[in-house]
Amino acid sequence: METDKFPTATFTLTKPVDVSKALDGSTQDVTLTGTMDLHGVTKAVTADAQVAVGTGGTVQVAGSVPITFADYGVKAPSLGFVTVDGKGSVEFSLDLQK
């Protein structure tokens, strides 16, 4: 993945998400629409996530973005006897508060 050249991946939300159903403390399933910047390539993506709002307004968001390595110019590594699948996901877990 050439992490020396590309040490970070960035997901940027491009559409707002209504989380009003999570305001009572229950978990709400949402789809996040945005862009993923990985290995110097930016692609439009969607991510399935769960949102929960706790007492005091703390917001938790967890989910994953499915990726195909070739779409980002990344060749799946191979050691001859072991190969890596060409698809994967970037998982995230956020705890947000004011």
Image (tube, grey):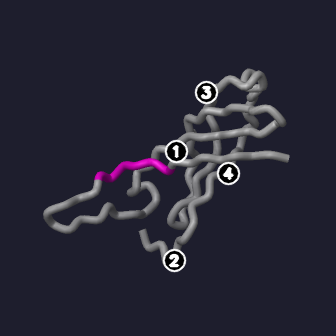
Q: Nearer the viewer, mark 1 or mark 3?
A: 3
**Residue 14: x and y, percent?**
71, 44
In front of the other: 19 or 36: 19
Q: Which residue is mark 3?
A: 29
Identify the residue at horizontal 32%, vertical 61% (top origin).
76
Q: Amino acid at mark 1?
A: Val
**Cα distance in 3D space between marks 2 and 1:** 22 Å
Q: Is residue 77 left or right of residue 8?
A: left
**Quadrant of the rendered structure where residue 21 is?**
top right
Mark 1, secondary structure of its residue: strand
In front of the other: 22 or 65: 22
Q: Which residue is mark 2?
A: 5
Q: How many residues crowd around disc 1 within 10 Å: few (fewer than 14), some, or many (20 or more)?
A: some
Residues rendered magenta in the picture = 85-90
Mark 3 or 4, nearer chain start: 4
Relative to 80, residue 68 above or below = above
Mark 3, secondary structure of its residue: strand
**Cα distance in 3D space between marks 3 and 2:** 35 Å
Mark 2 or 4, nearer chain start: 2
Q: Amino acid at mark 2?
A: Lys
Q: Amino acid at mark 4?
A: Thr
Q: Amino acid at mark 3?
A: Asp
Relative to 6, residue 51 above or below = above
**Cα distance in 3D space between marks 2 and 4:** 20 Å
**Residue 41: x and y, percent?**
54, 62
**Cα distance in 3D space between marks 3 and 4:** 19 Å
Q: Which residue is mark 4?
A: 12
**Residue 20: x and y, percent?**
78, 24
Q: Which mark is residue 65?
A: 1
Does residue 21 belong to the magenta stretch? no
Dots 2, 1 in contact, CB < 8 A:
no
Does residue 86 belong to the magenta stretch? yes
